[in-house]
Image (tube, rainbow, N blue to C red):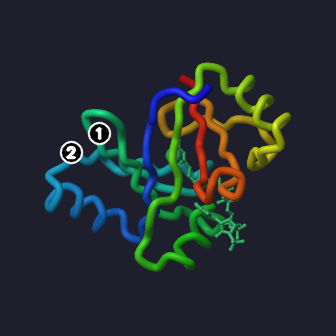
Amino acid sequence: MIGRLNHVAIAVRDLDAASATYRGALGAQVSEPQPLPEHGVTVVFINLPNTKIELLEPLGADSPIAKFLERNADGGMHHICYEVDDLIAARDKLKAGGARVLGDGTPKIGAHGKPVLFLHPKDFNGTLVELEQT
Ligand SMILES: CC[C@@H](C(=O)O)C(=O)SCCNC(=O)CCNC(=O)[C@H](O)C(C)(C)COP(=O)(O)OP(=O)(O)OC[C@H]1O[C@@H](n2cnc3c(N)ncnc32)[C@H](O)[C@@H]1OP(=O)(O)O
Ligand SMILES: [Co+2]
């Protein structure tokens, strides 16, 4: 069911500092920051030859990454995003198998303008999974 790895997301406290590290030490091309209030984060993307890195900074009082950063003061790997051809079919199959789809199960539009859903980390080996419609 899952297809390509779309991105690996890293939660950070300071997006400018993290962007500078990727740009400077790692020689990466880093996009401009993109605030996404509906997701409670500001993101930058780093395009690699085979996938993307998504750096996430909390935005607003109810950011879903706030608690994660309280627990991980230096930041850390927050989620992994796989592409699926049919997000609704994938959601329904996962729910039928007992996996927890986060929120009310209605896809939101993600950073790439495509529908996304999240799956509970406790159901996937301690890793928060994002699914993005191709
Ligand atoms: C930019 C837009 C979009 C894109 O297009 O790419 C994005 O990526 S948006 C990214 C941010 N959005 C989200 O993360 C939405 C989904 N997340 C959530 O609904 C919540 O963050 C969560 C996963 C349900 C966690 O909720 P929270 O309240 O922060 O934590 P809990 O205390 O309830 O945690 C329960 C349990 O799970 C462990 N946990 C939490 N987050 C993670 C994580 N990222 N990776 C692995 N494990 C995680 C947490 O440690 C708790 O474990 P125990 O302590 O053992 O109970
Ligand atoms: Co993401």
Q: Earlier in the sequence, mark 1 or mark 2?
A: 2
On residue 65, the disc is none
Does 69 appear above or below 83?
A: below
Q: Which residue carries the number 1 mark?
A: 47
Residue 62: image location, x then y, percent = 66, 65
Image coordinates for residue 8, horizontal then vertical, percent: 43, 48
Residue at 21% in and 45% down: 29
Q: Nearer the viewer, residue 4 or 47?
A: 4
Above or below, 6 relative to 127 = above
Q: Viewed as shown, does residue 118 lie left or right of 7?
A: right
In the image shown, does 45 or 100 lie closer to the viewer?
Answer: 100
- Mark 1 belongs to which amino acid? Asn
Q: Position of residue 46 (x, y in %)?
A: 30, 45
10 Å crowding of disc 1: few (<14), some (14-19), many (20+): some
Image mark count: 2
> Image check: 51 left or right of 63?
left
- Seen at 52% across and 41% down, the residue is 81
Residue located 76% across and 44% down the image: 101
Local SS, label 2: loop
Measuring 56% from the left and 38% from the top, which residue is drawn there? 110
Assess whether mark 2 and mark 1 are in contact (beta carbons under 8 angstroms): yes
Q: Quadrant of the N terminus?
A: top right
Q: Is residue 66 above or below residue 109?
A: below
Residue lying at the far top of the rendered structure: 85
Would you name the residue on which mark 2 appears? 29
x%, y% of residue 82? Answer: 53, 36
Label 1 sits on a secondary structure element that is strand
**Residue 56 sits in quarter:** bottom left
Residue density around tag 2, few if under 14, some if 14–19, many if 20 or more, within 10 Å: some
Q: Quadrant of ligand 1?
A: bottom right
Q: Is residue 13 left or right of residue 36?
A: left
Kind of residue at disc 2: Gln
